[in-house]
Image: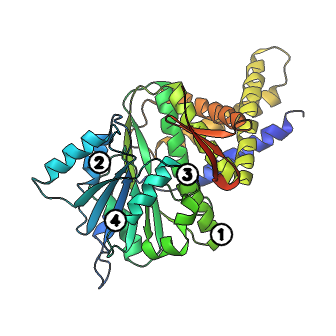
Amino acid sequence: MEYCIPFLLALEFVLIGLLFLPGKPVFWRGEDQAGVPVGQQPWPKVSLVVPVTGASAGIEAGLKSLLAQDYSGYEVILVTCDDKDEAVPIIRRLLENMQKGKGPDCRHIQAGRASTCGQKNRNLLVGVEAISPDSSVIAFADSVHQAAPDWLRLLVHPIARGETDITTGYHHVIPEDCRVITLARTATVLALYRMQESRILTQPWGGNTAIKRDLFERLKVRDTWVNNVVDDVSLAVLLKKTGVTATPVREAWLSTPLTGETCKNWLQWLTRQWLYLKYCFPVSWAVAGMLLTGLSVSIVVATCEALLLFVPGSDGTVGIASLAFLSAIMGTGISMRRFHPQPGPLHWWMAAVFVMIFMAALTHQKTWFTREIRWRNIRYRVTFKGRVTDIRLNSN
């Protein structure tokens, strides 16, 4: 009975997870929704703002895909901190090549070093200031993800039809090796993607969002971003306050090729996600952490109880119940797997799912005692609602 509470918490978590899983896999773009007429009105002019930094693998391919959208009325604003950023030579090369061919109007601007907010927020704000006056929709995308040619049309389509004022997609990590850590990050991103299906949990993801310009102005997003460490979670807070719900567009997903992922990189990324939630949605952060901790403890307990089945004289009922519990978790992992276009071998995927659960609980525990957010070579001191109180260059 001493394990009853964590066991029930874990069972509740699994049942909630199962609620997210029904539905048709959408990674194959079956119906061309973007080809559906939007009525008598033309497609809106879209300004795509892309913050760029570094020269990591995938940036050039990602930027090329964003510049090759089959959307007739869009412009692209590429924003770096300064001209010393490693991404600048890549951007200049792409722009030179574009001048020889066809493509959207594309500009590169420099935002300068952030002093009151996250550097990404600074880049986004300067990018928004530079958009064309006739743009009625602002879209945001990260530079390291690759977009299919119809991505922007799919993302903007519900707005063009007047069904919503803000849409959001997500991305799939595409593993290029079968290492457990690579697949664990793949499974983590997929779990976040699937939770976006619930309108109660849907939040705009900054790497794949479109919003009507007038809503952006009404929400006074600038006033929030100028002092905040994160873009999308702080925007989600504004949406919640005003009762506006972002519409998830399942088909508008980006792909992120990944190989050789390290445990350190994955855990740093996962810790940042928890910290964003901690400062902006503390109740959700606490509840999610309790559920994950209960789930992790119950998996360990259930495994021990199941092994006792092989010990003469042990309680068979408890052992069988534990096996059923572990089977439910494995079933959830297998069901989730079918929503990914390239999940890798089943046995490694299942190992990755269990690693994901334990590491998610571990990183959550770490955030209880963490008072700053680190991103690249910058440390941000953050207070309630994600407001930045201090910015320092990381000496490491």
How has the structure been colored for display?
Answer: rainbow
Verify CB contact (< 8 Å) between mark 2 and mark 1: no
Residue identified by numbered label 4? 47
- Looking at numbered disc 2 in the image, what kind of residue is underneath it? Leu
> How far separated are the C-alphas under marks 1 and 4?
26 Å
Q: Which SS class for mark 3?
A: loop
**Residue 330 placed where, x, y %?**
60, 35
Residue identified by numbered label 3? 117
Residue at (25, 69) in percent of width and height: 73
> How far separated are the C-alphas under marks 4 and 2?
15 Å
Ranked by sequence position, the earlier of labels 3 and 1 is 3
Residue identified by numbered label 2? 63
Q: Which SS class for mark 2?
A: helix
- Looking at numbered disc 1 in the image, what kind of residue is underneath it? Lys
> How far separated are the C-alphas under marks 3 and 2?
25 Å
Residue identified by numbered label 1? 241
Could you tell whether 229 is left or right of 170 in the image?
Answer: right
> How far separated are the C-alphas under marks 3 and 4?
23 Å
